């Protein structure tokens, strides 16, 4: 594992000159290679035409599938470009045929939009949502997961790194249980892609959804879905267009055999090409090195915050990632965000629906401040953040 060249990655991140960006779980600052690719593509669309640019840059658009497949240890035919993680996940989830009495197993820390989809499908089909309890670390309890498995369970679906905190669910262990019992496994890797290595063989997942703008440092309005080869043709997308399916005559259509059946024809082409560059950039730096630095920076931040009397860090997990969440004893999360923003530090807040079940169970519905670091953040930035926090 080669160490990250901090000076280089900061020089290649123009935003580092202007802000201390601890909102990488919201949207990261892109490397200049990604931003410049996007601008060049859009410039071509402006002066040459959108269709003509897509023809001219066909190789870059195709490269996106190759790059993502390499990131995940998958095949390019198993990748679909989708505009965000939610829709990517939806295209897989809503394709699942569910019957009355079928069960979906999920976690306490599940993402709000996913929870809405489970509840909607449960209402429509008579299937049942079962939330697997947490273990003592706040992650999915693997023994309870296995104990809940019976012939009614038709899907296991969890978030790898949930939206509001440092938690990393043991996704590969869940995959081993899913495989052992022959149950399909949908993994929401929205916040883990670009932060930790993802290998679909090791994870044992059959479907995986990702967004471009977070730890992958791609453009907003981009994402992708992975579907394992043997599942693609068993999943009929909830929505089809003439890119996803071929119209044979006035009465018949055939859905394409690869994962692009989950795509739209019209999409953010410039974003697709630039997301390919973002994935290449992450791969070049190395996901193991990225994980090591991101987790270490966050650990330093948590240790520093533990020394500040008014701050209470709320992260769970046996292993903690780059997302640090906390509450201030006297100030609301929005006030803290504004105060930090006035000092040139970007953070976000997390409240309400994002992780409803978890926040309700832990009495955190007032909301949290979320400071999420990336490998291009520096140690002096952490110190500055802590010193501003001390003055609030
Ligand atoms: C765990 C998780 N899943 C899904 C999403 C949704 O991603 P997107 O906004 O790209 O649809 C988020 C966004 O914060 C998330 O944290």
Image (spheres, rainbow, N blue to C red):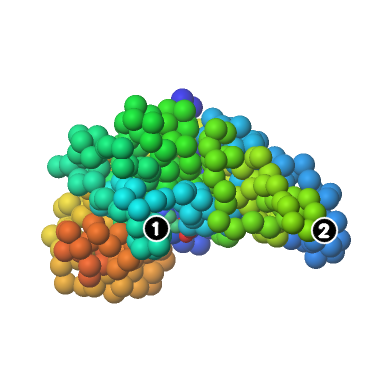
- Front in this rendered view, residue 87 or 307: 87
- Expressed as whole percent of the image width and height from the top left, the position of residue 37 reads 69, 51
- Front in this rendered view, residue 333 or 379: 333
Q: Residue at x 74, y 60 (%)?
A: 42
Q: Which residue is mark 2?
A: 51
Vertical position of residue 219 compared to residue 230: above or below: below
Q: Which residue is mark 1?
A: 125
Q: Are marks 2 and 1 in contact (CB under 8 Å)?
A: no
Ligand 1 found in image quarter: bottom left
Q: Nearer the viewer, mark 2 or mark 1?
A: 1
Badge 1 crowding class, 10 Å Cα cut-off, few under 14, some 14 to 19, many 20 or more, is some
- Expressed as whole percent of the image width and height from the top left, the position of residue 153 reads 32, 42
Q: Residue at x 31, y 50 (%)?
A: 101
Q: Secondary structure at mark 1?
A: helix
Q: Residue at x 20, y 63 (%)?
A: 360
Q: Secondary structure at mark 2?
A: helix
- Front in this rendered view, residue 79 or 195: 79
| Residue 112 in view (yes/no) | no
Q: Residue at x 23, y 57 (%)?
A: 358
Vertical position of residue 187 compared to residue 20: above or below: above
- Expressed as whole percent of the image width and height from the top left, the position of residue 301 reads 28, 49
Mark 2 CB within 8 Å of ligand 1: no
Q: Left of 208 or right of it: where is 280?
A: right
- Front in this rendered view, residue 194 or 289: 194
Q: Tell me the quarter of the picture where residue 44 sits.
A: bottom right
Vertical position of residue 178 compared to residue 26: above or below: above
Q: Residue furthest front?
A: 251
């Amino acid at each position: 594992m080669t160490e990250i060249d901090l000076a280089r990655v900061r020089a290649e991140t123009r935003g580092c000159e202007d802000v201390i960006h601890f909102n990488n779980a919201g949207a990261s600052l892109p490397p200049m290679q990604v931003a410049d690719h996007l601008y060049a593509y859009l410039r071509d669309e402006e002066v040459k035409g959108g269709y003509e640019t897509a023809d001219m840059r066909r190789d870059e658009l195709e490269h996106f599938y190759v790059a993502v497949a390499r990131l995940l240890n998958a095949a390019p035919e198993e990748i679909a470009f989708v505009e965000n993680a939610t829709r990517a996940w939806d295209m897989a989830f809503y394709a699942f045929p569910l019957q009355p009495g079928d069960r979906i197993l999920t976690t306490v820390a599940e993402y709000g939009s996913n929870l809405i989809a489970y509840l909607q499908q449960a209402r429509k089909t008579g299937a049942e949502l079962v939330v697997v309890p947490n273990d003592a670390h706040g992650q999915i309890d693997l023994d309870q997961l296995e104990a809940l498995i019976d012939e009614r369970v038709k899907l296991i679906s969890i978030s790898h790194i949930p939206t509001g905190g440092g938690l990393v669910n043991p996704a590969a262990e869940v995959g081993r249980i899913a495989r052992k019992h022959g149950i399909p496994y949908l993994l929401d890797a929205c916040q883990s892609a670009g932060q930790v290595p993802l290998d679909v063989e090791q994870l044992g997942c059959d479907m995986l959804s990702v967004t471009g703008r977070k730890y992958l440092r791609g453009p907003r309005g981009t994402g992708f879905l992975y579907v394992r080869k043997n599942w693609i043709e068993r999943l009929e997308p909830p929505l089809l267009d003439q890119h996803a399916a071929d119209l044979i005559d006035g009465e018949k259509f055939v859905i394409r055999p690869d994962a692009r059946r989950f795509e739209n024809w019209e999409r953010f082409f410039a974003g697709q090409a630039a997301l390919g560059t973002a994935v290449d950039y992450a791969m070049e730096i190395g996901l193991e090195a990225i994980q090591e630095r991101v987790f270490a920076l966050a650990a330093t931040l948590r240790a520093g915050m533990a020394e500040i009397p008014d701050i209470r860090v709320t992260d769970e997990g046996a292993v903690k990632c780059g997302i640090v969440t906390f509450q201030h004893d006297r100030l609301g999360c929005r006030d803290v965000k504004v105060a930090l923003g006035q000092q040139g530090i970007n953070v976000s807040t997390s409240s309400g629906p994002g992780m409803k079940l978890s926040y309700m169970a832990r009495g955190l519905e007032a909301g949290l401040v979320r400071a999420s670091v990336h490998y291009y953040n520096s140690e002096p930035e952490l110190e500055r953040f802590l010193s501003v926090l001390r003055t609030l």
